[in-house]
Image (cartoon, grey):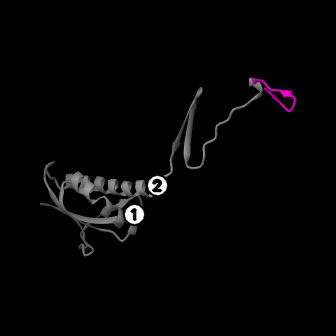
């Protein structure tokens, strides 16, 4: 190849791949893979719901519930994003933790369990249905 009257050879060229902001890049020979690492609001919301499911599964185990036991679940959070996420994914949460009842209850007593969903607080009480 010739550029501005100067002949360039393959050894004269340095190919460098730089990831875009919010992406991860890996190369191996002629193959390059780019992964979008930005979290959409939908993914963030689903992540909060899945974190809640994990907390509840641990709580079920601590309560020595049988695998097939249905539960009644009451929860609350002062965090608007947690409220929106748990409401949006209520069906998934109910199915995964076998909750026959899943309701937000702003009047949870002081002894309600509490946990952290990626830095956001949530409280809940569960009982065998």
Residue beneath the point at 27% across and 54% down: 92
Residue 5, picture quadrant? top right
User: Whole-Å distance between the Cαs marked 2 and 1?
Assistant: 18 Å
Give the quarter of the figure containing the C terminus.
bottom left
User: Residue tagged by mark 2?
Assistant: 40
- Percent across and percent down for residue 111 are 24, 70
Whether 8 is drawn above or below 127: the answer is above
Q: Which mark is residue 120?
A: 1
Answer few, some or many: residues within 10 Å of disc 2's Cα (few below 14, many 20 plus, some between 14 and 19): few
89 and 114: which is toward the camera: 89
Would you say residue 73 sits in the magenta stretch? no
The mark found on residue 25 in the picture is none
Residue ID at (55%, 45%): 23
User: Quadrant of the rendered structure where residue 41 is?
Assistant: bottom left
Position in image of residue 2 (x %, y %): 82, 27
Q: Which residues are magenta?
A: 1-9
Q: Give the quarter of the figure containing the N terminus.
A: top right
Residue 10 in the image, given as x and y percentages of width and height? 74, 24
Dot in front, 2 or 1? 2
Q: Is 63 on the left-hand or right-hand side of 78?
A: left
Q: Residue furthest bottom?
A: 107
């Amino acid at each position: 190849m010739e550029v501005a009257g100067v002949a360039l050879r393959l050894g004269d060229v340095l190919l460098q791949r730089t990831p875009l902001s919010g992406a991860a890049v890996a190369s191996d020979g002629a193959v390059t893979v780019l992964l979008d690492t930005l979290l959409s609001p939908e993914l963030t919301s689903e992540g909060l719901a899945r974190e809640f499911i994990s907390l509840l599964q641990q709580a079920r185990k601590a309560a020595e519930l049988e695998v097939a036991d249905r539960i009644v679940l009451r929860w609350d959070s002062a965090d608007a994003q947690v409220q929106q996420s748990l409401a949006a994914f209520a069906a998934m949460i109910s199915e995964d933790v076998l909750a026959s009842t899943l309701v937000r209850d702003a009047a949870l007593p002081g002894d309600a369990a509490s946990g952290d969903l990626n830095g956001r607080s949530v409280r809940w009480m569960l009982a065998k249905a």
